Image (cartoon, coloured by chain):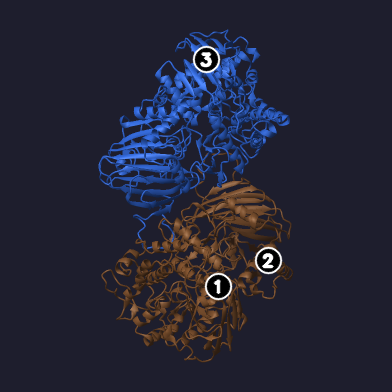
Chain colours: A brown, B blue
């Protein structure tokens, strides 16, 4: 009853939702300008299809020259662009490297153009000018008016199917371009093979095989349309023609099969002015047969609005897991758009028959779990996966099973580092699958094999070939002369090793636990007492010279400098504070970090974030400092955590197209927002503990999968009342600024009274921590 | 008991077989010099693996220039070459176009060389000089001594697995090259993608994806070895490096995964001088997992000799289907080598789990049949498939089911024309799957769906886009200005249409039968009474000018001239004879054909055969005339068939390396030999009738699958006694020089008395035919 009533409401009120109507607070355009790298198109929670406009693509190589610009079009869309190339079906959300953009479709009128043209000269190709005033982006619905051709494009999706509706104002040769050459990043060089078939006058199948960021990647697809194709051409744009036998039948017009590395096509329709043609585009990691079945299962009809509304209902259900009240509408938009971004990935990577392509390029069946892909683990282990471990436990378990399957298929015998679409792309450092596994295990997430997880983690942590790991095991740190970014690696390995020791303790494997507990102390080995920083060391045991703790380049770090990275001992904050000279000195370091004025030469070199992503020398736009503002909680001045996080939240997240100061990084930036706005944060995933801060929300209810609810209530919430005055859990005062997962999972209420000035006595018993 | 005794004999007597020991009469080197295009390597009957040495490869493009030489290395091996590049796992037998040569392995000593070097300068690469005196080629066993490195190579196979044994005389860095770039034809341009993994120190997996003659073709493989790999490197020879993220671990040595369009590898072993290393290489059309399973099922041990002998036992069993006595040992070698060539294909194309890749590039399961590939139908419909319809009925049914599956997967809705490895390569003309289906149906072969076969044939014959077929249906012939080789096409379509009418009659679809019977008379429409030849006609209805009936080029024919092709009405020989002026004139035409002296300018242009393949103007080295010598049987002078076939047999087939005058064409040339040597031939596959001639054998027994036997006995057989004096079937005199399949399938004895002169009264009652 409830559901059908809900559907009724959705159906008859259009954009107006039921009472809760949280979907209205999601603005998919947030982050689409500059470095956020989000996409505005249509998708459902964790959907395999992200059907979104691509506004341009910078080739990695242009006229033989390396452009180096792999960043700008990670999500295919830049808000500032005035043209749209077309609509493709796969997009990363917020990454700092690009790939995907598969199966581009673009409707057009008049003369056939198979070249996309350029942003400056859209008339030279099939792309079109568009205006933001004629663009709508809401969850699972994207709509835009193409200016030159006066075609209205509407997009919606299910998990594995993108649905397009093109309404043509003109009847002058209405057609649709299908460009299998188009992709995001490295436009001209990426295609390995493309295959295209017109099975009948309403069914097209094919695949696109690329070697981009994913070295060996194939997306299969099936396209069905609701009008008959009148005329078509499948053309291979290769310089080399097919080397098979000469045939004297015409293979360029209405010839139903084409293959080559660069196949493009146009499909022409008989449409009257004002008529629409609709397409359902299924994708599959396995086969065109799988893609077609995905369509048949997910959209067995042609009701575009039904698909759109059912997808929006899915979003509503997911967003309602956390209900918040905020001081301003913008805060609510920031909150729910962040939550939306958290639910864009990892994405489903299997067909309805449970088949998927594995890392070994064989077809596997996901037995008892849903297989996911796109694991940006260096980013997402920090807050996204810990968030999913609270509010998406079933999916979290499925993701872990996907990671274990990756391990089983890995010829390197490693858990994923940065993996997507049956590829390990080796991006960034560490083995941060491990904290994801550990966090889920410590939180008692059911549905995966804990012993297998531990074995996979231990094996991964012992692969000597991997980025200085052999040396790390031998000498207790990664020597900078053996493997660059050696301090970052040492610190992150040490933390990951802590997670393995936690897993081993949990499974009563004390020997292994102690072994990795010992390894987890390796952070000590790169600390330089003289400078007071973590610092790169050479094989000889000496620290590397020269040393500039403000520089992020060539100093033994990655996406961070010594000022930030020296704070990266999430599992031993007390030991770290002691190392760095004790409470007072440590507070001084943190204060300076936020307050110092970083010379331009440093932040100009900081990777992949806008200047706005930097506060003093604190870099929020990259991940290594995401826990830093919470470190005051481990000192005598926890109120400074409240101060900093309340400052960072509005400073770094704005409810506007350029509201994200750095890459959203597959939801990590947004997960930071969700946690922090609610007033708690997982400083050390794999532990049971969250650090508390002053919430941004007035109140919130988090609905857990076990049926319990966890609520946050504030008193005197305002922009000025940023400081915790009183705090209690289920009516009992909290003595430390920490909350345990055990508390949360049983449900309860966090009550916080806020005030304009720090209450320096709020957490008196810090030593108990 | 019998089998184990046989095995015992095989095992303990080495090359000496049991009583029958027919394997000894097979010489796989026959046809390896010049145009025969057979391969000398190891294989089992209809095996998916043809493990054979490749002696060179001429690239289709060399330094950007088209070489045009796609012929010479069709089978990878030319007897005249003095070097061997290595040993690859897939080879066509006797084709006139090249592809395959997948997964090349080559053992070597000393310094690693990843380049193959050249025939002139083998020292520049991993290839080696070899001598024929140190080479042995027998069924399912190939052995060669590599001169430079003193390595003994031995090869044997099962259906889907190649087994290598390399014995190293020297312990100086013994290693094996695995070259995934190597292939037959178009060496430098063909590779689309290669993928390689070292799963552990005795297991390698990967695949090779090419676009050669087969446009979209992939061979998956798994390699296991019986010694541990000590050291290895997987190297991508691409100009473009992998575009993934920079990593600072070494990916060039002992790094277990590599991909790119040009991957090569070396595997180094610790071997003492004199030690061997063995490899089992499984291939699969589906996956590396399938390839590995194929190994596990087919060779679950390391006993090389057992594999070799079991494969030879398979050959022995297949060869024993026809037992012959001949006048000379050479005749016996020619006979059994021909029979061997007949059993080299079509080849199995599915894994042990019955999965295979279909024409639609999806993975299918062969339900209730064995899937086969490599259908060179323009060649093999003539004699090979009719032969298999007598002596390999189960396989014939499986092949037809494979062709019907191809039809079901064909986006062109056509039965195979020339197909291999999930590709239609469209080579040659006609729709000659149809006579294969019709012949099997008329012969009552069980195991396939006759209605489906008819529907597939009818659909195929109505695909207007296909090579003038639309016009043919409209005007009754293929106009030369619409589609070249128009006379050949018209004549072959007409014959194929006859086959469809036969199928339709058989299934009581009289309407369809009459429709296609009518089409089958279209041969009339290209006959030019004025010149007395079949002749190309234009859309206007006029014959094309100028016209040279001796020329095979630009005259409306393919692989034949008007003199030969005018005789191509196998389903209506009487009508053809009448067209051509009646008995006497027709005999004159035939006589002239064999006796005229063809000016050099004509035979020099004849495709893909040696001058030796031409007798007068009769071209035996190409297929269109294969029935021609039997056409005398339809005249008043049937003794001339006996004369011609007894002349052609020793003239065109010799028991030596250059013994085949033209391409063996996947067994068609050899099937002609087998039939003709036995004294009968299927002039019109799809009919119930065989034309008789003077056997070459002294006697023969053909063992049929239904348990019956069909024997041929001669009296006074000798090289001079070529003419039939008396002939009887089961004791009753034959009145016409024809035998029916009904007779054969019931078993019986053909008794023939031979003499030195034609017995002109032998078949008196010709008019009864």
In percent of width and height, residue A656 lies at 58, 76
In percent of width and height, residue A617 lies at 42, 81
Quadrant where the C terminus of chain A sits is bottom left
Which residue position holds label 1? A31
Relative placement, left or right, of B113 versus B574 is left
Q: How crowded is mark 2: few (under 14 residues within 10 Å), some or many (20 or more)?
A: many
Give me the chain letter of mark 2: A
| Relative depth, front residue between A425 and B758 | A425
Which residue position holds label 3? B642
In percent of width and height, residue A75 lies at 54, 66
Q: Determine whether the residue tagged by mark 2 lies in a helix, strand or loop.
A: helix
Q: How far apart are marks 3 and 1 (CA)?
A: 87 Å
Q: How far apart are marks 2 and 3 (CA)?
A: 81 Å
Circle 2/circle 1 CB separation < 8 Å: no
Relative placement, left or right, of A323 versus A631 is right
Same subunit, labels 2 and 3: the answer reads no
In primary-sequence order, the first of circles 2 and 1 is 1
| Relative depth, front residue between A477 and B415 | A477
Give me the chain letter of mark 1: A
Quadrant where the N terminus of chain A sits is bottom right
Q: Determine whether the residue tagged by mark 1 lies in a helix, strand or loop.
A: loop
Q: Residue at x 31, y 81 (%)?
A: A531
Which residue position holds label 2? A309
B142 shown above or below A520: above
- Does residue B225 appear anywhere in the picture? yes
Q: Determine whether the residue tagged by mark 3 lies in a helix, strand or loop.
A: helix
């Amino acid at each position: 009853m409830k559901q059908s009533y809900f559907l009724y409401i959705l159906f008859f009120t259009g954009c107006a939702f039921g009472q809760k109507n949280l979907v209205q607070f999601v603005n998919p355009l947030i982050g689409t300008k500059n470095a956020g790298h989000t996409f505005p198109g249509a998708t459902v929670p964790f959907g395999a299809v992200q059907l979104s406009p691509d506004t341009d693509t910078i080739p990695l190589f242009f006229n033989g020259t390396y452009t180096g610009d792999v960043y700008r079009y990670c999500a295919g869309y830049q808000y500032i662009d005035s043209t749209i190339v077309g609509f493709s079906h796969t997009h990363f959300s917020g990454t700092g490297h690009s790939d995907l953009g598969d199966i581009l479709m673009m409707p057009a009128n008049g003369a056939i153009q198979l070249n996309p043209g350029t942003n400056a000269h859209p008339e030279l190709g099939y792309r079109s000018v568009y205006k933001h005033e004629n663009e709508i982006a809401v969850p699972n619905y994207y709509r835009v008016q193409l200016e030159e051709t006066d075609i209205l494009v509407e997009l919606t999706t299910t998990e594995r199917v993108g649905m397009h509706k093109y309404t043509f104002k003109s009847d002058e040769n209405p057609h649709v371009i299908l460009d299998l050459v188009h992709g995001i990043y490295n436009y001209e060089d990426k295609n390995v093979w493309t295959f295209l078939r017109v099975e009948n006058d309403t069914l097209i199948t094919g695949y696109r095989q690329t070697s981009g960021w994913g070295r060996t990647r194939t997306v299969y697809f099936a396209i069905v349309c609701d009008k008959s194709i009148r005329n078509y051409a499948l053309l291979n744009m290769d310089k080399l023609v097919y080397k098979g036998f000469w045939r004297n039948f015409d293979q360029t017009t209405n010839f139903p099969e084409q293959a080559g590395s660069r196949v493009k096509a146009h499909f022409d329709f008989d449409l009257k002015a004002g008529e629409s043609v609709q397409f359902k585009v299924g994708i599959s990691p396995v086969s065109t047969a799988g893609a077609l079945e995905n369509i048949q299962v997910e959209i067995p009809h042609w009701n575009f609005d039904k698909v759109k509304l059912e997808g929006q209902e899915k979003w509503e259900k997911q967003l309602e897991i956390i209900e918040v009240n905020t001081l301003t509408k913008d805060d609510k938009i920031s909150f729910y758009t962040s939550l939306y971004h958290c639910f864009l990935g990892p994405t489903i990577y299997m067909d309805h028959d449970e088949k998927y392509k594995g890392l070994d390029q064989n077809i596997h069946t996901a037995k008892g779990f849903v297989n996911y892909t796109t694991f940006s683990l260096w980013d997402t282990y920090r807050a996204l996966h810990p968030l999913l471990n609270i509010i998406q436990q079933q999916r979290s378990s499925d993701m872990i099973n996907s990671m274990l399957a990756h391990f089983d298929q890995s010829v390197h015998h490693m858990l994923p580092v940065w993996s997507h679409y049956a590829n390990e792309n080796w991006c960034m450092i560490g083995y941060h699958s491990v904290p994801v596994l550990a966090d889920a295990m410590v939180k008692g997430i059911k549905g995966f094999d804990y012993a297998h997880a531990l074995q996979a983690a231990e094996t991964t942590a012992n692969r000597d070939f991997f980025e200085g790991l052999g040396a790390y095991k031998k000498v207790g740190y990664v020597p900078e002369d053996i493997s660059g970014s050696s301090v970052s690696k040492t610190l992150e390995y040490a933390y990951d090793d802590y997670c393995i020791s936690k897993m081993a303790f949990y499974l009563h494997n004390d020997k292994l636990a102690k072994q990795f507990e010992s390894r987890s102390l390796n952070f000590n080995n790169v600390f330089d007492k003289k400078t007071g920083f973590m610092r790169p060391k050479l094989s000889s045991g000496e620290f590397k010279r020269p040393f500039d703790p403000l520089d992020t380049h060539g100093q033994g770090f990655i996406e961070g400098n010594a000022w930030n990275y020296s704070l990266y001992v999430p599992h031993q904050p007390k030991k770290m504070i002691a190392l760095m000279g004790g409470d007072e000195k440590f507070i001084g370091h943190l204060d300076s970090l936020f307050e110092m004025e970083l010379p331009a030469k440093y932040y100009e070199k900081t990777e992949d974030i806008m200047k706005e992503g930097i506060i003093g020398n604190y870099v929020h736009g990259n991940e290594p400092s995401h826990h830093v503002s919470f470190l005051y909680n481990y000192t005598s001045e926890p109120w400074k955590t409240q101060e900093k996080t309340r400052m960072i939240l509005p400073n770094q997240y704005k409810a506007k197209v350029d509201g994200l100061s750095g890459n959203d990084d597959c939801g990590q930036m947004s997960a930071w927002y969700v946690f922090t706005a609610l007033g708690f944060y997982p400083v050390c995933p794999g532990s049971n503990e969250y650090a508390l801060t002053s919430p941004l929300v007035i109140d919130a209810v988090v609905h857990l999968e076990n049926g319990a609810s966890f609520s946050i209530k504030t008193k005197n919430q305002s922009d000025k009342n940023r400081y915790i005055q009183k705090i209690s859990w289920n009516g009992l005062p909290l003595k430390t600024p920490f909350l345990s997962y055990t508390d949360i999972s049983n449900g309860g209420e966090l009550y916080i009274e806020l005030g304009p000035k720090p209450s320096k006595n709020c957490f008196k018993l810090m030593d108990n921590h």
